[in-house]
């Protein structure tokens, strides 16, 4: 290591502070390791101080840059989110669209089947029902109807007479 006890150290530090170097002190600095080390450390301290000053000056620019980055990131996320929402809407509408296309595609078949089913329902259910309703009013059902009406009238009149003539 260096011999720390150089008698010129004080003068070197004085010169570093003031910036005024005598030719003798400059010459000594070139040969004395201890004083050269002091000068070097002083230079480093000066650079650190410069860096700090630069860092102190930087925040404005850095904050602006970070804000710009943040805004860009938010814009990017909003765009991505919009894409996701549109994508989800598209995915959700797929079954509905597929169903609509399927219905359009099979509609002629459905229509034909519906017509056939309605025809079948009419033939199998309604026509027999109508025939059953129509039958007693037609032809040989009349006597039955008349007899039934007479029977009902007799039963009613007997009940009525019993109550009145007692
Ligand atoms: Zn020295």
Image (cartoon, grey):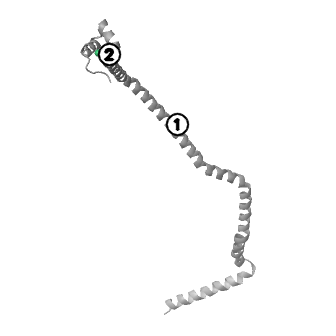
Q: Quadrant of the N terminus?
A: top left
Q: Residue furthest bottom?
A: 166
Taking the spot 68% from the left edge, 50% from the top edge, the residue there is 101
Would residue 100 appear left or right of 64 to someone viewing this image? right
Task: Bin the neighbour count of mark 2 within 10 Å (Cα to Cα): few under 14, some 14-19, many 20 and up.
Answer: some
Along the viewing direction, whichever of 58 and 1 lies nearer the viewer: 1
The residue that disc 2 covers is: 32
Above-or-below relation of 146 to 29: below
**At which x and y percent is residue 61?**
40, 23
**At which x and y percent is residue 3?**
29, 21
Taking the spot 42% from the left edge, 29% from the top edge, the residue there is 66
Task: Bin the neighbour count of mark 1 within 10 Å (Cα to Cα): few under 14, some 14-19, many 20 and up.
Answer: few
Above-or-below relation of 72 to 112: above
Above-or-below relation of 76 to 102: above
Q: CA distance from mark 1 to mark 2?
A: 66 Å
In this rendering, does residue 109 appear at all? yes
Along the viewing direction, whichever of 3 and 46 lies nearer the viewer: 3
In this rendering, does residue 21 appear at all? no
Would residue 164 appear left or right of 32 to someone viewing this image? right
Taking the image as four quarters, which one is ligand 1 found in?
Answer: top left
Would residue 3 appear left or right of 113 to someone viewing this image? left
The residue that disc 1 covers is: 79
Secondary structure category for the residue under label 2:
loop
């Amino acid at each position: 290591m260096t011999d720390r006890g150089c008698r010129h150290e004080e003068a070197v530090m004085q010169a570093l502070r003031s910036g005024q170097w005598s030719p003798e002190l400059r010459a000594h600095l070139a040969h004395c390791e201890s004083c050269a080390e002091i000068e070097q450390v002083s230079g480093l301290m000066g650079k650190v101080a410069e860096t700090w000053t630069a860092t102190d000056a930087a925040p404005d620019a850095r904050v602006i840059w970070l804000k710009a980055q943040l805004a860009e990131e938010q814009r990017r996320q909003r765009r991505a989110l919009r894409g996701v929402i549109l994508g989800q809407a598209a995915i959700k509408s797929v079954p509905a669209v597929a169903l609509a296309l399927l219905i359009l595609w099979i509609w002629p078949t459905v229509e034909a089947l519906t017509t056939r089913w309605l025809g079948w329902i009419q033939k199998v259910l309604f026509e027999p029902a109508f025939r059953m309703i129509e039958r007693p009013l037609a032809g040989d059902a009349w006597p039955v109807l008349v007899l039934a009406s007479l029977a009902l009238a007799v039963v009613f009149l007997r009940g009525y007479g019993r109550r009145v003539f007692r």
